Image (tube, rainbow, N blue to C red):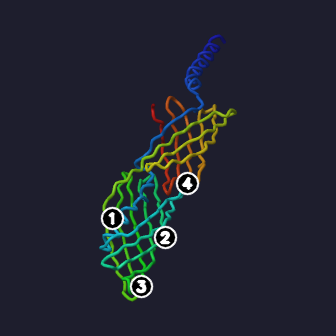
């Protein structure tokens, strides 16, 4: 009996030694943490920033002087592209003025790192030589792709028609262009008590756009893991979502993250920066 009691005591001691490190390392993940992302998980908001290129290209193609040009293009939280164009140019006394909407989409996934980028511009207006005037319209579209390394390639197509003068169309390849899609997620996690977590977070995208979020979550002391849901708090980032599962603090914050941001969605393991 004494020998059996000794064996049980030894087994209990071994069990305590095995579980003690785990119990000692259990820690509620609170505080400020920074996570840097890029590569296949890049977000390409600066793909919509090309007013100068459009205006200069129009002036060059028309072969004259640009009188005025404005282009606004934005991408919403779900990757929908919208905007407008208004342009006027003159060549040897002939003036053309056009305006119209921009529509398109940005769609990619973090597994392949590829993002499809496409939009169309439908313009209508008039051309005049000071004596006569004619209605004109132009349709321009772009279909391209952005790699995980940030290389944008694609093709432009253009069709220009003047009433009584017929139509002209052409296609042109987009010269390769490098974009910056790296982004940073900063988390400020607070312990609300009773296993509940709160706080705030900000995703700062490569073009400088900040996306603020409210954090809600829970922590389980049993398995020393937390889960967090980030909900956008402003209109610019409406439609985006970020969640972190298997969140654990052991010096650095580690987690499994899922995101849907401006037409890009993916899942990846993340680790906070060591300040």
Q: Quadrant of the N terminus?
A: top right
Q: Which of the two labelled residues, at mark 4 and mark 1, occupies the earlier sequence position?
A: 1
- CA distance for labels 4 and 3: 40 Å
Q: Which mark is residue 101?
A: 2
Q: Quadrant of the C terminus?
A: top left
The residue nearer to you, when weighing 34 against 52, is 52
Q: Which of the two labelled residues, at mark 4 and mark 3, occupies the earlier sequence position?
A: 3
Q: Which residue is mark 3?
A: 134
Quadrant for residue 23, please give it.
Answer: top right
Q: Which residue is mark 4?
A: 236
Q: Which mark is residue 174?
A: 1
The residue nearer to you, when weighing 226 against 263, is 263
Say which residue appears at 37% left-offset and 74% top-offset: 158
- CA distance for labels 4 and 2: 20 Å
- Answer whether labels 4 and 1 touch (C-beta < 8 Å): no
- CA distance for labels 4 and 1: 29 Å
Q: Which of the two labelled residues, at mark 2 and mark 1, occupies the earlier sequence position?
A: 2
Furthest-top residue in this view: 2
**Which mark lies nearer to you, 1 or 3?**
3
Say which residue appears at 63% left-offset and 32% top-offset: 222
Quadrant for residue 50, please give it.
Answer: bottom left
In the rendered image, residue 21, in percent from the top left (x then y), is placed at 55, 23
């Amino acid at each position: 009996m004494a020998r059996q009691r000794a064996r049980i005591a030894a087994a209990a001691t071994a069990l305590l030694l095995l579980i003690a490190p785990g119990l000692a390392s259990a820690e509620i993940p609170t505080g400020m943490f920074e996570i840097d992302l890029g590569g296949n998980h890049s977000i390409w908001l600066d793909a919509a920033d090309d007013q100068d290129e459009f205006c200069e290209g129009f002036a060059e193609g028309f072969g004259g002087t640009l009188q005025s040009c404005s282009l606004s293009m934005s991408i919403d939280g779900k990757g929908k592209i919208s905007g407008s164009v208004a342009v006027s140019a003159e060549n040897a006394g002939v003036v053309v003025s056009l305006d119209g909407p921009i529509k398109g989409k940005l769609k990619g996934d973090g597994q392949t790192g590829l993002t499809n980028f496409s939009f169309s511009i439908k313009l209508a207006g008039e051309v005049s030589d000071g004596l006569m005037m004619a209605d004109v319209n132009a349709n321009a579209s772009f279909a391209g792709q952005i790699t995980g390394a940030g290389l944008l390639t694609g093709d432009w197509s253009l069709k220009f028609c003047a009433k009584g003068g017929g139509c002209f169309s052409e296609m042109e390849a987009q010269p390769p262009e490098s974009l910056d899609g790296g982004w940073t997620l900063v988390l400020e996690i607070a312990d609300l008590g009773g296993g509940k977590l709160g706080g705030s977070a900000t995703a700062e995208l490569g073009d400088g756009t900040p996306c603020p979020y409210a954090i809600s979550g829970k922590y389980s002391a049993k398995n020393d893991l937390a889960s967090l849901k980030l909900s956008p708090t402003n209109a610019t980032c409406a439609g985006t979502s970020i969640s972190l599962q298997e969140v654990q603090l052991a010096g650095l914050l580690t987690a499994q993250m899922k995101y849907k941001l401006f037409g890009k969605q993916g899942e990846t393991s993340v680790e906070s920066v060591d300040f």
